[in-house]
Amino acid sequence: MRTGVRVIVEIEALTKIYEGKQRVTAVDGIDLEVQPGEIFGLLGPNGAGKTTTISIATTRTLPTSGRVRIAGVDVVAHPAEARRFIGVVPQYNTLDRSLTIYENLYYHCRYFGFSHGQARQRSEELLGQFLLLERRKAYPAQLSGGLAQRVQIARAIAHRPKVLFLDEPSAGLDPQSRLAMWKAVEELRKEGITVVLTTHYMEEADALSDRVAIVDHGRMLAIGSPQKLKETFGAQTMIHLALRQMEGAEALATGLRGQAGVQSVEVVGDGLRVFTMGGEGVLAELVHAASPLGLRDIAIAEPSLETVFIQLTGRDLRE
Amino acid sequence: MSSAENGMDRGLLVKTFCGLLLRDLRVLSRELGPFLLRVGMQPLLFLFVFTFVMPRMAGGGAMAGVGPGFGEVLLPGLMAVAIMFSGIAAVALSLSTEFGITREIDDRVMCPAPVALVAVEKIIFSALQSMLAALMVIPMAMYIPATPVYPDLHRWWLLAIVMILSSLLAGALGLVIGSSVSPKHIGLVFSIIVVPITFLGCVYYPWAYLDKIRWLQVAVLFNPIVYISEGLRSAVTPQVHSMPIWVVLPALVVFLWFLGRLGLRGFLRRVIS
């Protein structure tokens, strides 16, 4: 009935204020649109308002103002209808502890109106797809974090939602499980499921997302593909020159500032930090210019969402 | 709030409800043994001690209140306790864990139906368990006491109405407790709410006998268990004096309405922030 909806998730002027002893503005006017089939990342530090935004979009929290539509359905006016299009993987493990893995999938399908046969078929299919066949009779308490996460993703997409929300999907996962989870999310793209994920790991946002929105203090600071963000927000290659003698470092910095390709130069504790566009072209000249001061080491950091975030907020993501 | 949804697919609503019910049945089926023990142990021991052991010890003399006839008083009372306990255990205990650290309820809350449906299903499923628990008391009363107690089932329709209302009421009370008490304090609730309302719920004595202690007789009218016991008394053992049914049934409806609303509101508050 709502085929032809171009935008899957529409968030308009969304705010959420928690009144109480302390008034907390968790979300402060967020606008964004997610297109069908894309993997969209909400990147920001803890407490930036990512989880609240997802909670509102998934009908679990009521907004103070603004609106969210999922596949054209307003989540406040018609939450039950909107939930048909939504799959959710929360931060914590909410698997039904009284049911086996198979039953978690099977009954989830039944809640969404599947018949016995359909629910059984879909559950089998998911067990296969997520490599869970051997664990079908296990209970959630018997699973490792990574495995439980896989079951949660399988369960969340069991009713074939249009959009899957993943809230901090790699929180608490070991590196191996995290890679497996990334792979599972990549696979979802092939099925045409739109994914919205929150994360405070910039590598995760960078590796998975087609587009990223950077949020902080409930506000959206920037939005775009990881590549575009890096280009737009002057994420530069950072070259660290460690020097033996710091006398004359200031003069060297001044000299370098005039060089083509060099954006800015800072004097730091043990040498210079040079921000460049591209990097490689100026490297030889930097080495040449710095040698008289006893250049002892060079470190090159490629542009990343982390440097974009620092650029936008002046803070580190993990601060 | 969510009950005002237009355009909701009724067929889907029914299927969702059945899905929730099937899930609970599956979980119960796995714990059938513990369930039967939990609901059966109390009436079993009560009947054994008070209507089998004690009458023999007293030789029919010393313990006037525990003579023949006590079984008649006790049967509806124990049915009321069975209803109460299973209602509270089924809803309040399960909700306290599901709302607790694990947030297991989340997946059901995210089903494509108004959130209230999940709570209503909890009440209805607990009502089924309550009725089963109450019916289990009847054969026990027929076989355990020294003087067997046979329920009068002529007014079976009244029994059915009272049982259904009472069981839903117990589930609603369970919902109120489960959604308002933190998991840490759920054990305490049993001692400070469930035990008092049971002992002061005209379970072990008919309400009419309280006329010697007038203030108590009036005070217990605020206790919903009184109407459950008296309603069952009127249905199962009409020979024992009980409150008129035209008082009992409206009181049950009012308490069900009140506790149901309170419980639903608490549930929604816990689920939607």
Image (tube, rainbow, N blue to C red):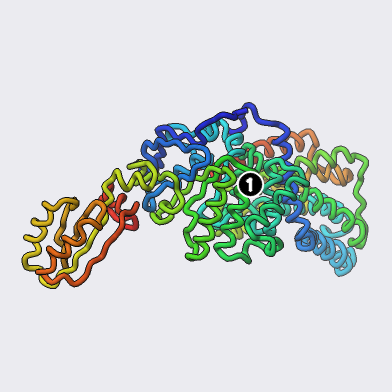
Q: Residue B4 lies in what quarter of the image?
A: top right
Asked whether residue B201 appears in the rendered view, the answer is no
Q: Nearer the viewer, residue A162 or B55?
A: A162
Which secondary structure, mark 1? helix
Residue B121, picture quadrant: top right
- Residue B149 vs A222, above or below: the answer is below
Expressed as whole percent of the image width and height from the top left, the position of residue B100 reads 56, 55
- Identified by mark 1, the residue type is Arg
Relative to B252, A223 lies left or right? left
The residue under the point 57% across, 53% down is B103
Residue A26 versus residue B94 in the image, above or below: above
The x, y position of residue A39, in whole percent, is 48, 45
Left or right of B172 on screen, residue A254: left
Q: Which residue is painted at 29% across and 60% down in the image?
A: A301
Looking at the image, can residue B187 be seen?
yes
- Badge count: 1
Task: Give left or right: position of B245 versus A49.
Answer: right
- In which quadrant of the rendered image does the C terminus of chain A lie? bottom left
Residue at the image position 48 percent from the left and 44 percent from the top = A54
Chain to which the residue tagged by mark 1 belongs: B
Viewer-proximal residue, B118 or B181? B118
Q: Is residue A265 left or right of residue A316?
A: left
Q: Position of residue B31 (x, y in %)?
A: 75, 60
Task: Return the residue nearer the eye: A98 or A285.
Answer: A285
**The quarter of the displayed image where residue B63 is located:** bottom right
Residue for badge 1 = B108
Residue B232 is situated, as x and y percent measured from the top left of the image, at: 81, 45
Query: Where, quadrant-wise, is the N terminus of chain A in this rendering?
Result: top right
CA neighbours of label 1 inside 10 A, class few (<14), some (14 to 19), many (20+) = many
